[in-house]
């Protein structure tokens, strides 16, 4: 087992703590709002535990932020304040890895771009569920770039292949699953809807 700690763990810890304190919530209040245990939130905020994709989904839902927003804020993507286009090299991009499933997420856009775009790599056999609240106040499209994605939208299951897209409607519990023996790569494109 590797002792290497994901550099984003500390940044995610600081972002979760900042979002909680900005709302003047106690650990218990965030636990109640998210359904994540107080002990787990405490470990995340102290940088002692890397949250899973499921936990990030629950925390972002409690904060009424998308997972992409929470991670983009944690990554501290530099501001484009001088108006000069910035090339962001793939080799320099921060990538977050779910310790439970191996799911990898790379934020493509910066915090000031009007849409959020993330590239996801879902390993064979991985299944990542999100609560309906994680999709509140956003409009989202999932675009399969390579492989096959089994996408559960509430009670409806969609089998998506390379090139397929799905535009998500009203918030529902959703599951991203790779039921194949090869990696699935997809993009998530989202914009904010009604402001919370």
Image: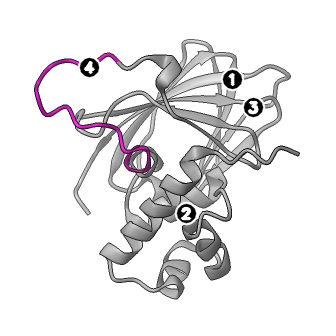
Task: Give the labeled residue for mark 2.
Answer: 58
Look at the numbered discs 1 and 3 and tell me whether their residues touch, using CB distance below 8 Å.
Answer: yes
The mark nearer the N terminus, 1 or 3, is 3
Side of 115 relative to 128 (left or right): left
Q: Which of the two marks, 2 or 3, is nearer to us in this view?
A: 2
Read off the magenta span.
Answer: 72-87
> How far apart in space, not on screen, are marks 2 and 1 (Cα)?
23 Å
> How far apart in space, not on screen, are marks 4 and 1 (Cα)?
29 Å
The mark nearer the N terminus, 4 or 1, is 4
**Residue at left 76%, top 49%?**
100
Mark 1 neighbour class, 10 Å CA radius: few under 14, some 14 to 19, many 20 or more: many
Q: Quadrant of the C terminus?
A: bottom left
Residue 92 in the image, given as x and y percentages of width and height:
48, 24
Mark 4 neighbour class, 10 Å CA radius: few under 14, some 14 to 19, many 20 or more: few
Residue 188 in the image, given as x and y percentages of width and height:
47, 32
Q: Secondary structure at mark 4?
A: loop
Task: Give the labeled residue for mark 3.
Answer: 178
Within the magenta stretch, is there residue 81?
yes
Pick the residue in front: 77 or 41: 77
> How far apart in space, not on screen, are marks 3 and 4 (Cα)?
34 Å
Residue 164 seen in the figure = yes
Side of 29 relative to 46 (left or right): left
Pick the residue in front: 13 or 192: 13
Look at the numbered discs 4 and 1 and tell me whether their residues touch, using CB distance below 8 Å.
Answer: no
Q: Quadrant of the N terminus?
A: top right
**Residue at left 29%, top 40%?**
111
Task: Give the labeled residue for mark 4.
Answer: 86
């Amino acid at each position: 087992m590797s002792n290497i700690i994901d550099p984003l763990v500390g940044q995610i810890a600081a972002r979760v703590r900042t979002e909680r304190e900005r709302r003047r919530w106690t650990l218990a209040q965030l636990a109640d709002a998210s359904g994540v245990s107080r002990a787990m939130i405490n470990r995340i905020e102290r940088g002692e535990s890397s949250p899973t994709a499921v936990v990030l989904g629950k925390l972002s839902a409690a904060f009424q932020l998308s997972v992409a927003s929470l991670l983009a804020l944690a990554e501290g993507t530099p501001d484009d304040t001088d108006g000069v286009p910035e090339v962001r090299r793939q080799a320099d991009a921060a990538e977050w890895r779910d310790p439970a499933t191996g799911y990898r997420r790379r934020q493509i856009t910066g915090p000031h771009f009007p849409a959020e775009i993330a590239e996801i790599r879902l390993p064979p056999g991985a299944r990542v569920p999100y609560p309906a609240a994680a999709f509140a106040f956003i409009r989202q499209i999932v675009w399969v770039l390579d492989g096959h994605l089994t996408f559960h939208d509430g009670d409806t299951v969609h089998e998506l292949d390379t090139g397929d897209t799905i535009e998500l409607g009203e918030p529902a519990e959703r599951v991203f699953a790779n039921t194949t023996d090869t990696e699935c790569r997809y993009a998530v494109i989202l914009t904010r809807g009604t402001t919370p």
